Amino acid sequence: MLGIGIDIGGTNTKLVVVNRDGKLLAQDRFKTEPSKGAAHFIRVLAGHVDTFKRDYGRQLVSIGIGAAGDVDPERGVLRFAANLGWGNVNIVKPLGKLTGLPCVMENDANMAAWGAYELECKRKNDDILTLTLGTGIGSGMILDGKLYHGATGSAGEAGHLKLVPDGRQCNCGGKGCFEAYCGSYAIMRRARELIKNEAAFVRRYASPGHERFNTICLTNAAADGHAAARKVWAETGHYLGLGLAGLILVLNPGRVVLTGGVSKAREWFMPAMKKVLSAQQFKTPFSKVKIAVSDNSDLGSHGAALFGLERALK
Ligand SMILES: [Zn+2]
């Protein structure tokens, strides 16, 4: 039995077909083009699912979707998605009708959390916190072996925890949020304050083919001993530690899985992050937690496929 996993992002939508062990059998992607509207998007999406149906037929039993935004998992409605510009779109119902497959939809960080539970932890640990470190910060929780939704399905909006009173401006409109310090946009905003000659910095440190002032460039510079780059990563680690400490105190997870583009700089932010965690006064919740970085950049789509299968076969 196979499941389809879908990851809806602002730029691209990714699809995968996996088996129950998470083995990837097929994949596909297309431009989301949110400006063409949700109805158009759902038709295009159903067309891509049909291609899989021609190849795998009745082996396909479910669709799991992760979407970046505020999702109502019970009704399958994307209530709000800043990067798509859509509000209150029911995706699950029309997609189920068009494809004839049972669909579930969750926030993308929740699906990354399910992916971490199944693929990184092999279901051996029932209490897992996953942080997705990208432009913003998302989080998902598996508690007692179940995906935790909260009262409105919005659990895990860790990116908007207020870390610093009246602190840096966040994309949400608020100030001092976790992601206003540790989201990639915030990291590069801080880097701009310390690195004056941006063009020269990019020329020297950007990876070939990616000549942009971004976190990859900043990681390369840190590896080369660039003092300001290392300082930015150390500060990022400090704030990551503060945010994570609060989450660990509340949830007492056995595992924390970090994923997303920013997590690739682990070598440069981890020491400062761990320093904050080990300086906590109340030690017990920190004594057993293992912190890991997942290099699986498809944790979201794979997690969505496996979550869809879990629901359909329950
Ligand atoms: Zn915020």
Image: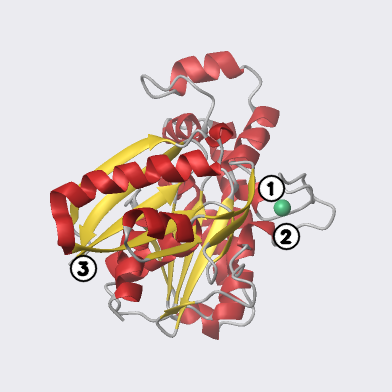
Residue 259 visible to the viewer: yes
With respect to residue 204, does 98 lie above or below?
below
At label 1, the amino acid type is Ala
Q: Quadrant of residue 58?
A: bottom left
Q: Residues within 10 Å of mark 1 (few under 14, many from 20)?
A: many
At label 3, the amino acid type is Arg
Closer to the camera: disc 3 or disc 1?
A: 3
Residue 312 position within the rendered picture, expressed as x and y whole percent measured from the top left: 32, 73
The CB of the residue at mark 2 lies under 8 Å from ligand 1 = no
With respect to residue 129, does 204 lie above or below?
above
Residue visible at 39% across and 60% down in the picture: 96
Residue 129 position within the rendered picture, expressed as x and y whole percent measured from the top left: 48, 70
The CB of the residue at mark 1 lies under 8 Å from ligand 1 = yes
Residue visible at 74% across and 60% down in the picture: 162
Q: Residue 20, which numbered label?
A: 3
Q: Which residue is mark 1?
A: 180
Image quarter of the C terminus? bottom left
Q: Is residue 198 left or right of residue 25?
A: right
Residue 193 position within the rendered picture, expressed as x and y whole percent measured from the top left: 70, 30
Image quarter of the N terminus? bottom left
Q: Residues within 10 Å of mark 3 (few under 14, many from 20)?
A: some
Closer to the camera: disc 2 or disc 3?
A: 3
